[in-house]
Image (cartoon, rainbow, N blue to C red):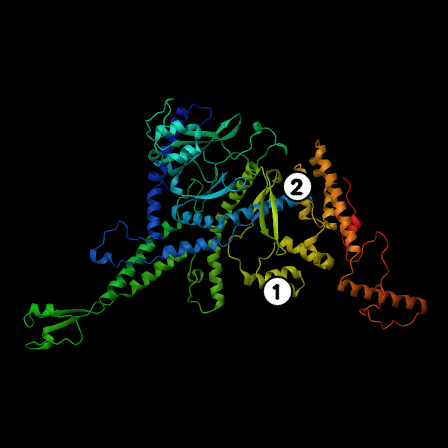
């Protein structure tokens, strides 16, 4: 029994599933737990009525199922206070896509970069499929229906090799094990899939064609005795259940999946959880199979907020807590509206002095004239309405304030002008509201962590071929990230940066960066980024940049081209490790070859070529081709004239050397020769001819193509 909600489950025994069961036995074991759980959630837990009532408050249909007078029905007072608060929270806590953070599985530069690529791939995939909009709807369902759900599925018809697709699942279409608690993996989750034509079902389950035709009521048969349907029969629609379940076998949890009709008479298909790499499937070409998750799980990603841990679904919602205040607010507003309608007062006629027929002719026009016998004041009197008590208006304002307090959405947070006198008061109010919303933001982040982990798990299972993602890099250029299942290393840890879904406070970041700059505690790159409106990097990244800027400014200027990492080299290494030869590149520089040299001294390289002499041969072939390209580029550079900038630097250096020589030889004063004087005709721009094999000033091709040994 739930102590706080006085609700008790109806199940006397747990659900037992096993894929090895006969279909009829499996149907028997699954039907009862599903039906009992649906009754529990909708009747005992009252989810159906709660969701219907909350939706009426949001739409708004505040007077749904409420009796009112006919004359009132056309002008019912409905202030959508709850709608405004719900939408404010949804937009604030989902202002940005949750930023994933992936920790490497091993302590090596290659593993670190692979983790960064997985992180980039997760974010790029989410951006591609606009999951921020899906998260916003899930947050709305959380506030209105006590739960929100996303589902990840693999669609082989999307893209060249198929794609992982996120989709929204309506909470009322899910039946969850009534015994499941907060944070647990339920024993089963059944999704009600509506309006599937029998033609679609046959295409999804071709092995069960005859069962599906029988389910459709087809009776016509061909000469072989097989059922044959008319086109009109295939166009009929059917509701089915997609049931994900787990069971315990051989001292470990297993996952299963089955599809049944809504009457539980036919099993359309069943299989093991497809989103899992199984040991009995054997090793792939890249090595042993592995997984990111600990056990096979259903692909439904939930979001919870107001939960005491006793239930898989939240025990209440903000909308329910605001319902009474919304009704009071509407009632007081209706009273004020009625009082305003009666502000014109009413007329009372003396029927002795004015006949009823004359009264009926009156229209209320200002130029009307009517005559009476006797005292005019006794013929007609205007009755003023009673004054509206002050507490009516006060009660209306109080109820609105209570709703804002429950949701944490006051005027300034909703984009309205507040009654505060100063900007500081507005900023304090926004900060207080964001503190309340930060709790919901953390619920969104918890959902994002589960989402990214399951997405990485599906990378492991379905990305057997290369999938490419295009993202904007730190230098403003587009980077291409290659994602494949063997590039998702074992042991990685996936989290979400705290506060990454909330709106970015650009002004506060700019003030913070400016204050750091006053004390020399920030590097120019970060200062320029924050000043241009970009988000502030992590403290670790800022410290790395600052140390590089302080110790070696020249190295800092070329941080984007650091010797620690070359994306082109890493991409080519990944291609080589997969047993293929990468496409030759036009530009082979020192950074590219340096990364190759460092990689080939690591254990990762030895593991890649272990027992694979063909891969080692590909490395040798590729490096020889790199040597040829580098030498060709070097020969081309030797025949080119220096650039104007290089000419000026060479002239300045030559002049400085000449001055030093004269001072050493004769101790004379420095010459006044200008370093940027143009060379005379026939003069080689004040610099000696480079020796054979030397690198000219403009060349940087790996120091004359010094290559690593394969």
Q: Residue lying furthest front in this view?
A: 223
Residue under circle 1?
514
Question: Residue 148 at x, y = what percent?
Answer: 43, 45
Residue 508, relative to residue 478: is it above or below? Answer: below
Q: Quadrant of the N terminus?
A: top left
Question: Residue 418 at x, y = what percent?
Answer: 42, 65
Residue at image point 31% right, 64% down: 393
Locate residue 84 relative to residue 499 in the image: left or right: left
Q: Residues within 10 Å of mark 2 (few under 14, many from 20)?
A: some
Which mark, residue 574? 2
Answer with mark 2 or mark 1, whichever residue precedes in sequence: 1
Residue 396, image quadrant? bottom left
Q: How many marks?
A: 2
Q: Is residue 9 visible?
A: no
Q: Secondary structure at mark 2?
A: helix
**160 or 69, which is in the foreground?**
160
Q: Residue lying furthest top in this view?
A: 224
Locate residue 147 relative to residue 286 in the image: left or right: left
Question: Residue 380 at x, y = what percent?
Answer: 12, 73
Q: Secondary structure at mark 1?
A: helix
Residue 357, image quadrant? bottom left
Q: Nearer the viewer, mark 2 or mark 1?
A: 2
Residue at image point 55% right, 48% down: 124
Q: Are marks 2 and 1 in contact (CB under 8 Å)?
A: no
**523 or 686, which is in the foreground?**
686
Question: Residue 210 at x, y = what percent?
Answer: 39, 27
**277 or 316, which is in the foreground?**
277
Q: Is residue 573 visible?
A: yes
Q: Residues within 10 Å of mark 1 (few under 14, many from 20)?
A: some
Residue at image point 35% right, 49% down: 55
For the residues labelled 2 and 1, the Cα–Cα distance comes to 42 Å
């Amino acid at each position: 029994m739930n102590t706080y909600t006085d609700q008790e489950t109806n199940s006397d025994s747990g659900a037992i599933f096993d894929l090895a069961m006969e279909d009829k036995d499996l149907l028997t074991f699954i039907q009862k737990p599903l039906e009992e759980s649906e009754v529990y959630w909708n009747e005992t837990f009252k989810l159906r009525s709660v969701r219907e009532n909350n939706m009426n408050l949001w739409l708004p249909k505040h007077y749904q199922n409420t009796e009112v007078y006919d004359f009132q029905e056309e002008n019912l007072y409905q202030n959508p206070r709850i709608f405004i608060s719900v939408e404010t929270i949804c937009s604030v806590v989902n202002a940005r896509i949750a930023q994933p953070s992936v920790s490497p599985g091993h302590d090596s530069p290659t593993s670190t970069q692979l983790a960064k690529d997985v992180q980039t791939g997760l974010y790029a995939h989410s951006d591609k499929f606009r999951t921020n909009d899906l998260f916003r709807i899930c947050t709305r369902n959380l506030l209105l229906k006590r739960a929100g759900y996303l589902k990840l599925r693999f669609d082989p018809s999307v893209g060249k090799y198929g794609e992982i697709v996120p989709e929204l699942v309506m909470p009322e279409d899910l039946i969850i094990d009534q015994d499941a608690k907060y944070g647990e993996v339920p024993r089963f989750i059944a999704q009600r899939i509506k309006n599937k034509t029998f033609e679609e079902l046959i295409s999804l389950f071709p092995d069960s064609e005859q069962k599906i035709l029988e389910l459709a009521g087809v009776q016509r048969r061909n000469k072989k005795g097989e059922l044959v349907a008319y086109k009109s029969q295939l166009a009929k629609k059917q509701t089915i259940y997609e049931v994900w379940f787990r069971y315990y076998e051989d001292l470990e949890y297993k996952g299963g999946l089955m599809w049944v009709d809504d009457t539980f008479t036919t099993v359309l298909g069943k299989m093991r959880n497809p989103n899992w790499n199984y040991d009995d499937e054997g090793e792939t070409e890249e090595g042993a199979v592995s997984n990111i998750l600990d056990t096979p799980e259903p692909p439904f990603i939930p979001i919870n907020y107001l939960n005491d841990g006793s239930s898989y679904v939240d025990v209440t919602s903000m909308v329910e807590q605001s319902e009474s205040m919304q009704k009071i607010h509407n009632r007081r507003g209706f009273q004020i509206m009625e009082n305003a309608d009666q502000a014109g007062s009413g007329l009372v006629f003396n029927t002795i002095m004015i006949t009823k027929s004359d009264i009926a002719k009156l229209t209320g026009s200002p130029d009307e004239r009517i005559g009476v016998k006797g005292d005019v004041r006794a013929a007609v009197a205007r009755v003023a309405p009673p004054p509206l008590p002050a507490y009516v208006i006060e009660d209306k304002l109080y109820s609105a304030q209570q709703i804002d307090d429950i949701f944490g959405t006051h005027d300034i947070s909703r984009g309205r002008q507040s009654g505060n006198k100063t900007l500081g008061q507005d900023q304090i109010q926004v900060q207080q509201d964001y503190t309340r919303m930060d709790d919901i933001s953390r619920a969104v982040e918890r959902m994002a962590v589960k989402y990214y982990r399951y997405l990485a798990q599906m990378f492991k299972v379905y990305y057997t071929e290369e999938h490419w993602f295009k993202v904007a890099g730190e230098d403003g250029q587009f980077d291409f990230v290659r994602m494949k299942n063997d590039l998702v290393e074992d042991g990685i840890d996936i989290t979400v940066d705290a506060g990454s879904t909330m709106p970015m406070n650009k002004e506060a970041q700019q003030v913070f960066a400016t204050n750091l700059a006053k004390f020399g505690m920030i590097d120019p790159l970060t200062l320029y980024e924050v000043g241009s409106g970009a988000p502030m990097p992590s403290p670790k990244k800022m410290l790395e940049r600052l140390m590089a800027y302080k110790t070696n400014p020249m190295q800092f200027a070329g941080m984007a081209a650091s010797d620690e990492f070359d994306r082109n080299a890493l991409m080519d290494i990944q291609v080589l490790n997969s047993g293929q030869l990468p496409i030759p590149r036009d530009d082979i520089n020192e950074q590219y070859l340096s990364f190759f040299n460092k990689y080939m001294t690591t254990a990762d390289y030895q593991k890649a070529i272990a027992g694979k002499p063909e891969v080692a041969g590909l490395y040798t072939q590729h490096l020889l081709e790199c040597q040829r390209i580098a030498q060709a580029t070097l020969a081309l550079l030797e025949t080119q004239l220096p650039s104007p900038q290089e000419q000026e630097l060479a002239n300045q250096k030559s002049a400085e050397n000449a001055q030093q020589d004269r001072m050493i030889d004769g101790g004379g004063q420095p010459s006044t020769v200008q370093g940027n004087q143009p060379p005379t005709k026939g003069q080689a721009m004040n610099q000696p001819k480079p020796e054979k094999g030397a690198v000219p000033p403009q060349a940087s091709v790996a120091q004359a193509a010094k290559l690593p040994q394969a």
